[in-house]
Amino acid sequence: MKVLIIEDEPAAQQHLADLLEASMYDVTVSGTAGSVKQAIELIGGSKNIELIFLDIQLSDGLVFEIFKRIPVEIPIIFTTAYDKYLLEAFQVQSIGYLLKPITLKNLEDAIEKNQKMASYYQSGWQNQIEQLLTNKGMATRKRFLVKIGTSFKPIHLEDVAAFFREDLVYLITEDGSRYPIDESLDSLESQIDSSLFIRLNRKTFVRKSFVKNLEQYTGSKLLVSLKINLPFEIIVSQEKATWVKNELGN
């Protein structure tokens, strides 16, 4: 996911970039700006941007001037120390309003909201309505078609133990067989029932029943062991550790 950060305070800009790096999402900061003028140039000249993090009070005025000057169709997450602009924020392209100091949990929740909204639009309004009426949410994926040599094999979700990312994204089954798939973990997370699977970090999305145990790791992080072997250790960040323990305990 490519994002822009519009923030006039260098420390706040770096803090947000650090949180994005620590988040479970695969995020690339494609550009930054610290003023309304710079933001107009940056947004107008950027391509394939999926999300903008936008401070409200910049060095040369309020960001709402941007929307008067250029069309902005990219989803916006506002980041500010003030709640008085909430109404104005949601009159433009806003999908989130984060009050400083921003936490990793709040940031990930806002990104998750954006991911789900994007999936709704991509699936079409009719599918969205049907999902809401049947209370299925985004848990729509039931099987995967994997390539084995020159043939293809369907694998049902109930046979999947985990998904993980190295150079590619892989599906691994209960018996330890692994197959590359043409998906992103972010996309998979929006399609699969969150009561069955959990996103542990940027590289792993696993079936809850295949989590063997959790161990305390350095800096209040968690080391996760599974009932199958992955080619790397699974480390949960300090910021996400409490949430993971709560999810696996329910």
Image (spheres, rainbow, N blue to C red):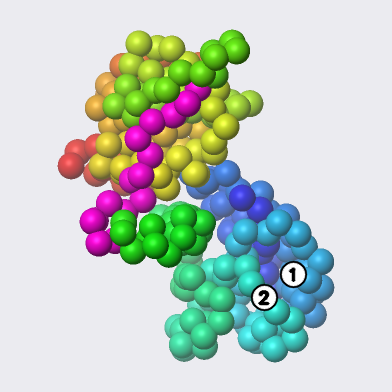
Cβ–Cβ under 8 Å for marks 1 and 2: yes
How packed mark 1 is, by other alpha carbons closer than 10 Å (few <14, some 14-19, many 20 or more), is many
Q: Secondary structure at mark 1?
A: helix
In percent of width and height, residue 140 lies at: 35, 44
Q: Which mark sits nearer the N-terminus, 1 or 2?
A: 1
Residue 211: image quadrant is top left
Q: Which residues are magenta?
A: 132-146
Q: Is residue 77 above or below residue 47?
A: below
What residue is drawn where x is 28% and y is 31%?
208
Q: Which residue is mark 2?
A: 72
- Give the image location of residue 222, x and y in percent: 37, 32
| In the depicted structure, whether residue 146 falls above or below residue 130 | above
On residue 239, which mark appears? none
Between tags 1 and 2, which lies in front? 2
Give the vertical position of 102 relative to 178 (above or below): below
Assign the C terminus to one quadrant of the image: top left
Q: Nearer the viewer, residue 232 or 165?
A: 165
Q: Marks 1 and 2, how far apart in space? A: 8 Å
**Of residues 16 and 113, the one drawn nearer to the viewer in this rendering:** 113
Given the image, on which type of amino acid does mark 1 rest?
Ile
Depth order, front residue of 18/69: 69
The three-letter code of the residue at mark 2 reads Val
Label 2 secondary element: loop
Residue 148: quadrant of the picture = top right
Which mark, by number, is residue 43? 1
The residue located at (51%, 18%) in the rendering is 152
Residue positioned most to the left: 250
